Amino acid sequence: MSALNSILENFEPVDAGASDEGDVRSQQLKAAAYAEGFSAGEAAAKTKHDAESEFFAEAADQISRALGAMPQRLNEQLTEALSAIMHKTLPTLAAKGFADEVTAAVIEHVNTESCGSLVIKTSEERVADLTAAFEASGGDQSVRVEADPAFSGSMVAANWESAGLEMDVEAVAQSVLEALDKYLSQFRKEA
């Protein structure tokens, strides 16, 4: 037996005379209350949904703006970091690498040319570093390092028959930093 047959077997017609006007009115009130409650629930759900939709739309908009600005902000932060690192480390590296750079340059020329004795002039504060670097390199004993009161910081000069050398490692480092600052200034203006 199907479900429909089962329902039809249990169907009992309502006695039209048995129903009174109060029951009908009660049923109408229940139906109206149900409809009113259903409408109120739908309205409340729609209001909640609209508020949530507005919240998520605003959040998505803020995220979109933040992501859009991120490359520029990242570039700004990276350029500031690069500048700070270079300004802090380059002068230190220049000062620490002074003796090695000068020694390497002089030894290259001394080994390729016959230049006899060689006097290297530098600032008083750099004589000991430069002398120690030449001794450690096993360089030619005909190289002497002397202080020159006209020199300061990492300035150095050497002259021999066919060539010469003048170097100011700190000035080169300062030039690099100035060029970096100029580039970063232009980069900031373009960004």
Image (cartoon, grey):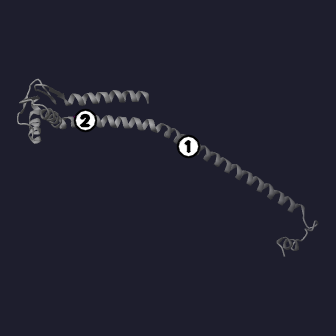
**Rendering coords of residue 123 (x, y %):** 11, 29
Residue 90 sits inside the magenta stretch: yes
Front residue (pair 140, 119): 140
Front residue (pair 191, 14): 191
Q: Which mark is residue 90?
A: 2
Marks 2 & 1, CB-CB < 8 Å contact:
no
Q: Is residue 127 above or below residue 4?
A: above
Front residue (pair 55, 187): 187
Residue type indicated by callout 2: Leu
Q: Is residue 38 above or below residue 67?
A: below
User: Circle 1 is placed at which residue position?
Assistant: 60
Asked if residue 22 lies left or right of residue 99, the reply is right
Give the structural element (helix, strand or loop) at label 1. helix
Residue type indicated by callout 1: Ala
Q: Residue furthest bottom?
A: 1
User: Which image quarter: residue 122?
Assistant: top left
Residue 53 sits inside the magenta stretch: no
Per the picture, the main secondary structure of the magenta-coloured stretch is helix
Q: Residue at x 42, y 38 (%)?
A: 74
